[in-house]
Amino acid sequence: MRRGSLRIQVWNGRPGADGGSVAVRINGEDRTLPSGTIVSLASGERITLRPGVYHEFWPDSETCVLGEVSTANDDVADNYFADPTVGRFPPVDEDEAPLVRLLGD
């Protein structure tokens, strides 16, 4: 496991759909992957997903800070969560001490 790494799984349709390929860009390089592929990214690496690519991502370690940026932020049509326990914003525990300091802290 690499420090600060993450994994992202990509599909050409809803997760679990059969076959096909997914076009992505990893660190500026175009790649075509089989639908359902899991990609590992090290700290500082980037993946660009085209609209309509279904994806799920998670950290490989507790020291990973990750985020997603959308070109269009349409909560009605742009966000689909296959796992109903995942939401757009995590709950905030206001009285908890920070685990990791953010840039502005």
Image: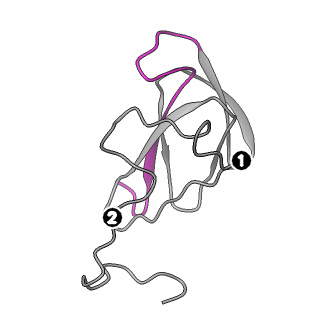
> How far, Cα to Cα, is label 1 from label 2?
24 Å
Residue to which mark 2 is pinned:
91
Instruction: Give the image location of residue 2, x and y in percent.
Output: 39, 57
Residue drawn at (69%, 35%) of the image: 50
Residue nearest the viewer, comparing 80 with 29: 80
Instruction: Give the image location of residue 17, x and y in percent.
Output: 46, 14
Instruction: Give the image location of residue 105, x and y in percent.
Output: 48, 90
Q: Which quadrant would residue 23 be assigned to in this image?
A: top right
Q: Earlier in the sequence, mark 1 or mark 2?
A: 1
Considering the numbered disc 1 on the image, is that residue within a helix, a strand or a loop? loop
Instruction: Give the image location of residue 101, x and y in percent.
Output: 42, 84
Residues under numbered marks 1 and 2 in contact, where contact means CB atoms less than 8 Å apart: no
Residue type at mark 1 is Ala
CA neighbours of label 1 inside 10 A, class few (<14), some (14 to 19), many (20+): few
Q: Which mark is residue 13?
A: none
| Stretch in magenta | 1-20
Residue type at mark 2 is Pro
Residue to which mark 1 is pinned:
72
CA neighbours of label 2 inside 10 A, class few (<14), some (14 to 19), many (20+): few
Residue nearest the viewer, comparing 62 with 14: 14
Above or below, 28 relative to 17:
below
Q: Which quadrant would residue 99 be assigned to in this image?
A: bottom left
Above or below, 92 relative to 39:
below
